[in-house]
Image (spheres, rainbow, N blue to C red):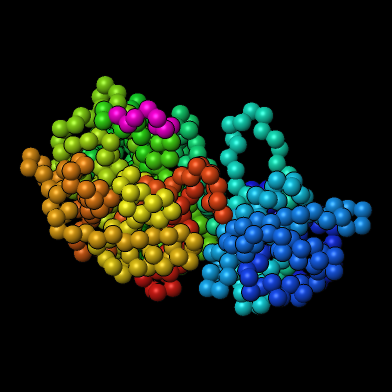
Amino acid sequence: MLNNLNLSNTEKERAAYGEARALVLLLCKECEAALSKLELSDEVLQAVSALLAESDEPFEIGKVSACSLLCGSKLRHIIIAGCGSGRECKPTAFKQAAGEAARALAAKKCERAVLAAPILLNPKRTPYLEAIAEGLYLGAYSFTLYKSKAEAPVTCDVKIVSACTAADLALKRALVKGQAVSMVRDLVNEPGNKLGPEELADFAKQVAAENGLSCEVLDREALKDLGCGALLAVGQGSVREPRLIALRYRGAGDAPYTAFVGKGITFDSGGLSLKPAANMGEMKDDMSGAAAVLGAVKAAAELQVPINLLAVLSCAENMPGGGAQRPGDIVTAADGQTIEVVNTDAEGRLVLADAVWYAAKQGAARIVDIATLTGAVITALGKETGGIIACDDGLAAAIKEAGRLAGELWWQLPTPPDLRKAIKGEEADLLNSTGSTVGGGCITGGLFIGSFVPKELPWAHLDIGGTASRAKAAGFVSKGGTGFGTLTLIKLTETLAAEGQR
């Protein structure tokens, strides 16, 4: 069970609808003609036809139309979720629709439901089944941990009518991915007073122990010994000391590691370059990158992906205490490069500078870092698309394709020479911020991190500054922490493993 849903597969027959209190239909425009193949009763078919006729754009992706029907002495709810038309009818569209359907089911407080979609009658449509199950799990997510009088949610058993091959495996895979993303969302939604670097390290140890992973946690003294001056500088204003967390999953023998590196600022006040008070509370999500990395390595282990993964979480709390770093300070990163701190609110790139160096030092063959790095990415790409800065176009393309299959959008941004020059300093090797006059803040932030990756290594930076949180739920994406990037990283592990890039 996950998020109060139990999912199971059932064969197409009228008896499958049995005692269900709700019937969920996922329909694209072309599927309407195949409704008769679902073994629905005549009265249900008539109600569905009437509902479709009454609704405006009923096949729009995620559009929910609903009615209730008296079947004998019992009331049955009918929920139709649109999945698009024509070329829109991809697994991602069905995942979006399933997410909306899950919230509709929760509102009805149904204990038993049946979900049907004509497309699932095709044995070759297993990817659609997996996507639908993911959408149901993720759409049903909610975070009520700190509500003292939260109403106990109703557990709903959902039978999915399907003729798909390997249906049980598809549902298992969806559960693993749903659990990973839900864990990430839980971490992102935790308030800053509950989750600091040490608490996140303890949680990572628990995840490692449960999944057969090795886990090493470097405290402040160990970081000093390594010379991680950039990470330490960010954390020096807080009473909560920084941590560098490294988990290893070995699924491919002696093959080299792929490193996923996540920004783990458990709360970001901006430091002495203090953020505006309005909405500062949202900065508990500044560890979304680290959480996504933890979720991805957990899922890879559970799915037994044949790849070796090094997951690095670079964690600190950015506070304006008496010992905080100052604008104008010069710090030395672990690789020996010096950095002038122009703005203490450009701290994510500092903690990642030492972290990507560490990943390379551990022998990673390629590095992908992920971070809520900039607000500039919102200006460039909006709030539903993540940004990619990369030194390797092949790796960037693989990430975009993994995101497309996972239902997460990415776009690669250019790295022109003038922006590479803009991060060069006069009094130090690098500037941690180019200010507002240069522009291209998403690009310069990524290029700064890339300056600490050896030139021979494929590297990509993922900026989720606009996608890590959402004010309102939509599709399979939740309100609050979204877990954006987790599904992309999971799919990327499978892609790299399939291509033999281990």
Q: x%, y% of residue 237?
A: 29, 27
Q: Residue furthest left?
A: 426
Q: Indicate the position of residue 35 as horizontal and vertical percent values.
A: 74, 72
Q: Quadrant of residue 341?
A: top left
Q: Nearer the viewer, residue 64 or 493?
A: 64
Please identify the quadrant where the C terminus is shown.
bottom left
Where is residue 492 shown, x and y percent of the image? 42, 64
Which residue is at a point 30% across and 63% down the rendered structure image? 365
Compare residues 69 and 254 and report the one nearer the observer. 69
Q: Residue furthest right?
A: 73
What segment is highlighted magenta in the picture? 274-281
Task: Identify the residue at image location x=55%, y=47%.
Answer: 473
Q: Is residue 369 visible?
A: no
The residue closer to the viewer here, 44 or 447, is: 44
Tell me the residue at 34%/30% (across/down): 276
Quarter of the image where one finds residue 394: bottom left
Q: Is residue 414 left or right of residue 494?
A: left
Is residue 288 something one can see in this rendering?
A: yes
